[in-house]
Image (cartoon, grey):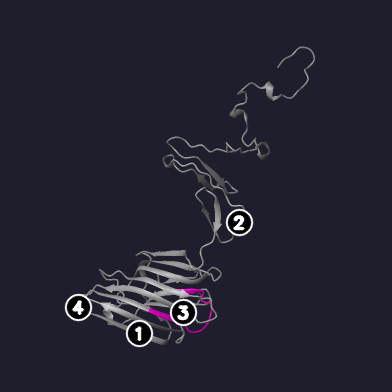
Amino acid sequence: MPYLGSSPAVTALEADDLASNSVTTAKIANDAVDTDKINLVSTSSAPSLEAKGTSGQTEGYIQLNCAENSHGIKLKSPPHSAGQSYTLTFPSSIVNDAFLKTDSSGNLSFATPSAGGLRFISTTDIVDSDNAANYTFTSFDSSSFDAYLFVLINVVPEGDGVYLDMLTSSDGGSTYDTGGSDYNWVFNSSTVNNSDSGVDGDIDADDAKIMLTGNSGGGANQIGSASGEHGVSGQIWLYNPASTQNTHGTYDLFYQANTPESVAQIAKGGFARMSAADVDAIRLSFSDGNTIESGTINAYGVVNA
């Protein structure tokens, strides 16, 4: 501004020199306020940072971005309708291979699954368009699990009148054990239809595969994909596959045939891999090269004791 006489001395503005609201948001350059100028201090009655919601639009949230600020995660408040006001307090230290839980006051702590408890590992959903040649599982972890459970839900073959087989591997599934005396297995089957029922079984002390279902009672008892048939359901257990002893397993399966006799069958059995090895993969498949048309297989691990 113009002035008379000598120029006035240059002095820095003090806070008291500024009128209220004289510095607007528009006068502050983007990124002008850095971490050195931010000092968020919480008190017993007020947080250091509050993310407010917008009425009728969204709850308050904080977003944590990646280094390139191209994506991130959000921490978001429950909806207004929940009427919730609580505090989550994090634990003082980290515990490996544990999960967070909270008490009724919101205090978080790390906890480990109980020894012997089941932990979900994976699910595989096969739809009609997949026609998977087989089901393989390679996520074995001897440091975490002593045994494994595979739950089959309506696993349907592409063709009709087939059996369900299983193979093991000790090289992560690159190859599977198919020697003529790699396995032995035994099962009992209970069959019922509209006019009769019976109990049968089968056994093989030297086989190139584990036969989980069989031909006891005739071909009508094989697993089918015809109308009214819904594949095979049940469970397969594998015990201590990393053991230096022979790996054992048991199973309990149900399947039915939509024949005039409406055959239903339960197969219960057990098996062993006849040479000791660290089993680290299995494969389930139907006989005669039949693919899996549809179904779900869930895998669980039994936590080490």
In the drawing, what numbered circle is on residue 248? 3
- Between marks 1 and 2, how big is the CA–CA gap? 52 Å
Q: Which of marks 3 and 2 is nearer the N terminus?
A: 2
Label 2–label 4 contact, CB within 8 A: no
Specify few, some or many for label 4: CA neighbours under 10 Å numbering under 14, 14-19, or 20 or more: few
Check disc 1 and give the amino acid type.
Asp
Q: What distance separates the C-alpha of mark 3 from that of mark 2?
A: 37 Å
Q: In which quarter of the image is the N terminus?
A: top right
Residue 274 magenta-highlighted = yes
Discs 1, 2 touching: Cβ within 8 Å: no
Q: Name which residue type carries label 2.
A: Ile
Q: What stretch is highlighted in magenta?
A: 269-282
Disc nearer the start of the sequence (2/4): 2
The type of residue carrying mark 4 is: Ser
Task: Looking at the image, tell me whether mark 4 or mark 1 is earlier in sequence order.
Answer: 4
Q: Position of residue 81 (x, y in %)?
A: 41, 40
If you read the primary sequence from the N terminus, does the residue marked by circle 1 or circle 3 appear first? Answer: 1
Residue that label 1 marks: 202
Separation of disc 1 and disc 3 at Cα?
A: 18 Å
Q: Residue 195 carries which label?
A: 4
Callout 2 secondary element: loop
- Residue 109 image offset from top left, x and y in percent: 55, 54
The reply to whether the magenta stretch includes residue 131 is no
- What is the CA distance from the residue labelled 2 to the residue labelled 4? 63 Å
Position above or below: 190 against 144: below
Q: Residue at x 59, y 52 (%)?
A: 91
Q: Mark 2 points at which residue?
A: 94
Question: Going by the picture, which residue comes out furthest to the front?
Answer: 104
Q: Do labels 4 and 3 touch, CB within 8 Å? A: no
Identity, as a three-letter code, of the amino acid under mark 3: His
Q: Which residue is drawn at 44% across and 67% down?
A: 299
